[in-house]
Amino acid sequence: MNSVALVSGASRGIGRATALLLAQQGYAVGVNYLSNEAAAQSVVDEIVNAGGRAIALQADIADEEQVVAMFQRLSDKLGPITALVNNAGILFQQTTIENLTAARINKVLSTNVTGYFLCCREAVKIMSHRHGGNGGAIVNVSSAAARLGAPGEYIDYAASKGAVDTLTTGLSLEVAAYGIRVNCVRPGLIYTEMHASGGEPGRVDRLKTHLPMQRGGQPEEVAQAIAWLLSDSASYVTGSFIELAGGK
Ligand code: NAD
């Protein structure tokens, strides 16, 4: 069967590493991006230059029409999706509850939660045996913050990731009989640009000494776990969570 993956937020960080690894493993890859077309195209070029198949797909995952159009384009160009990686996410600056605004909370939830729901919905419509599909696998990228709560830092973000965890559990049960596995990874402190957008570029180095493994993780280490969960090696794994948090 033709393996076709969509990775959201794949122009950099964990999404980029995952898109590149999946392409190495033989998937045709849809490289979703929000605004940095050049960065997404460089991921596509790297895959194509290595002999793989990939296309860049612009879409805001929080926008229903854009998500529907993205899945249509993926089907048209690469074939029906077999693997979805819900990875795109946002994190705002550290703050306490007194300073959280409705606008910020809604922005975080619309991307980190609604966006995941919409992409799951479109993938399930194509993958599900119930609709004549061939099955498939979904991996949601949550966060250790879902377990830890992130008090005084990003409780909005942590709560959004708690919702991702519950989405994973509920959807895995809903679609298990229709040939779709749904799993989740929970990264801890990973070296990506997300920490800079969250207002603290050196965050991983500041906090790594608190981790049992005494180091932050690399995006490629997260990508390996995602790729395994999507693969046939994990054919009896659904509704599961893998912690990638250096032991914390
Ligand atoms: P990153 O900021 O480098 O990448 C996130 C990507 O998502 C960016 O390319 C961004 O443009 C994209 N994005 C944001 N909003 C979008 C939208 N509405 N539509 C489409 N794309 C959108 O961060 P990262 O560390 O690679 O994060 C990837 C995932 O891993 C996120 O879900 C994040 O919450 C999670 N995570 C990261 C860490 C970490 O320490 N870096 C830890 C735990 C979880």
Image (cartoon, rainbow, N blue to C red):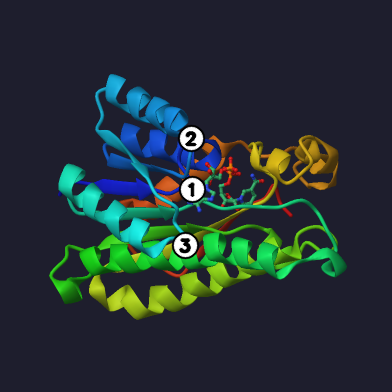
Amino acid identity at mark 1: Ala
Q: Mark 1 or mark 3, which is nearer the start of the sequence? A: 3
| Residue behind label 3 places its C-beta within 8 angstroms of ligand 1 | yes
| In front: label 3 or label 1 | 3
User: How far across and down, in percent of the image, does residue 166 sit?
Assistant: 54, 75
Amino acid identity at mark 3: Gly
Residue at image mark 3:
115
Q: Cα distance, mark 2 to mark 3?
A: 18 Å
User: How far across and down, in percent of the image, does residue 248 sit?
Assistant: 74, 55
Q: Which of the 4 image quadrants contains residue 135?
A: bottom left
Q: Mark 1 or mark 2, which is nearer the start of the sequence? A: 2
Say what secondary structure mark 2 lies in: loop
Q: Cα distance, mark 2 to mark 1?
A: 26 Å
| In front: label 2 or label 1 | 2
Residue 224 sits above or below residue 171 on the image: above
Disc marking residue 36: 2
- Disc 2: CA contacts within 10 A as few (<14), some (14-19) or many (>=20): few
The reply, left or right, for residue 172 in relation to residue 185 is: left
Taking the view exactly as shown, the residue that stands out farthest to the front is 103
User: How far across and down, in percent of the image, does residue 176 sit?
Assistant: 32, 75
The reply to whether discs 3 and 1 touch (Cβ–Cβ < 8 Å) is no
Residue 52, can we see it? yes
The reply, left or right, for residue 41 in relation to residue 208 is: left
User: How far across and down, in percent of the image, does residue 48 sit?
Assistant: 28, 25
Q: Mark 3 or mark 2, which is nearer the start of the sequence? A: 2
Residues 73 and 79: in front is 73
| Residue behind label 2 places its C-beta within 8 angstroms of ligand 1 | yes
Residue 20 sits above or below residue 107 on the image: above
